[in-house]
Image (cartoon, rainbow, N blue to C red):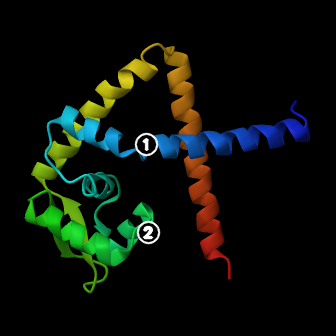
Amino acid sequence: MATRRQRQTAMRHLHESLVDLIAITNQPYRDDALLAEAGIKLDRALFPLLVGIRRFGPIGVVDLAERAGRDHTTVSRQVAKLADLGLVERRPSPSDRRIKEAVVTDEGRRATDALDAARNRLNAPVLGHWSDRDLLELDRLMRRYVDDMIALRGADHESP
């Protein structure tokens, strides 16, 4: 059983690892490499939104902007560009006609599938030497961590 100090140290190390991971994944050259590997010609600022729409859509611009950590007016213009490119479609929300939701088109799905395949190829040198057990354990623990964070956020938003 871990001591209080060991848990605090582990939590600090986890936070440091997350900060490092975000810093690494936010490096522009990585986005350029991913787009090139996928064979997709798309502005680097647009593809994370396309991936977010695929993952969370149908989704409104305000929610997408919050998830992306960007201003909603900027995201609105970028989603309009994605729509002009035929990668997403904007349609009224069934629950609130004032909100336009974005949803990926078939062409957008092909693009995100190509990005997923490229991401797998680019990650192969990093994860290829991991055991199946380690890879599955990382997947399980990351999902658990994210789900618990979402549950906590949901509980926070429900509080008066």
Reply above or below: 21 against 105: above
Identify the amino acid type marked 2. Glu
Q: Amino acid at mark 1?
A: Thr
The image position of residue 154, as x and y in percent, is 59, 66
Q: Say whether marks 1 and 2 touch (CB < 8 Å).
A: no
Is tag 1's residue or tag 2's residue first in the polypeptide sequence? 1
Q: Quadrant of residue 35?
A: top left
> Residue 147 at x, y = what percent?
56, 50
- Dot 2: element: helix
Please give the residue where the numbered disc 1 appears in the rendered image: 25
Binning the other alpha carbons within 10 Å of mark 2 as few (below 14), some (14 to 19) or many (20 upward) gives: few
Question: Which numbered disc, 1 or 2, marks the residue closer to the eye?
Answer: 1
Q: Secondary structure at mark 1?
A: helix
Left or right, 145 with reference to 107: right
Question: Which of the 4 quarters of the picture holds residue 156?
Answer: bottom right
Q: Nearer the viewer, residue 79 or 53?
A: 79
For image coordinates 56% across by 48% down, the residue present is 146
Q: Is residue 94 above or below residue 64?
A: below
Q: CA distance from mark 1 to mark 2?
A: 19 Å
In which quadrant will I find the C terminus? bottom right
- Placement of the N terminus among the 4 image quadrants: top right
Q: Which residue is mark 2?
A: 66
Residue depicted at 13% across the width and 65% down the height: 83
Q: Mark 1 packing: few (<14 Cα in 10 Å), some, or many (20+)?
A: few
110 versus 44 height, above or below: above
